[in-house]
Image (cartoon, rainbow, N blue to C red):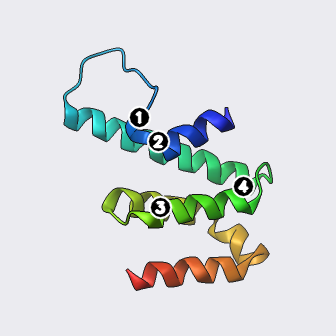
Amino acid sequence: MLKRCQEEFYNSEKTTITFPFQMDGEEESARLREIKLGNIRLIGDFFIKNAIPIKIIQECVEFLFKNVDNSNMSTFCELLKKICKKLYFNDPDFLNKMVKQLEEI
């Protein structure tokens, strides 16, 4: 499941998800954004439960900052809200780095 979540996160435009009903392009984009946010929440939950290493979080953050747009920044903020407390106590340097990256935008 984690592998599929990772594939959907990195390739949301080439998703393997099929919807059981017809949608126009805008509706489909909105659904895919919701799925992307759900995936990032799941990744955050896995990190909080120590099921994945911080390296995966770092890769997700790097991926989101490669193409700065509203969708990626909202996804980043969702991840940051989810894992901020754990990072504050376990890896404050990485948390500070992420905040500085956000300030530069």
13 or 75: nearer the viewer: 13
Residue identified by numbered label 3: 64
CA separation in Å, label 4 and label 2? 21 Å
Question: What amino acid does circle 2 point to?
Answer: Asn
Q: Secondary structure at mark 3?
A: helix
Q: From the image, which quarter does the C terminus lie in?
A: bottom left
- Mark sitting earlier along the chain (1/3): 1
**Up-down: is 9 above or below 76?**
above
Label annotation for residue 47 = 4
- Mark sitting earlier along the chain (4/3): 4
The mark closer to the camera, 4 or 2, is 2
44 or 52: nearer the viewer: 52
Label annotation for residue 11 = 2
Residue identified by numbered label 1: 14
| Crowding near the residue tagged with mark 2, few <14, some 14–19, many ≥20 C-alpha atoms within 10 Å | few
Q: Are marks 2 and 3 in contact (CB under 8 Å)?
A: no
Q: Secondary structure at mark 4?
A: helix
Pinpoint residue 57: horizontal percent, then vertical percent: 65, 60
- Mark sitting earlier along the chain (4/2): 2
Pinpoint residue 104: horizontal percent, then vertical percent: 41, 85
CA separation in Å, label 4 and label 3? 17 Å
Q: From the image, which quarter does the N terminus lie in?
A: top right
Question: What amino acid does circle 3 point to?
Answer: Leu
- Mark sitting earlier along the chain (4/1): 1
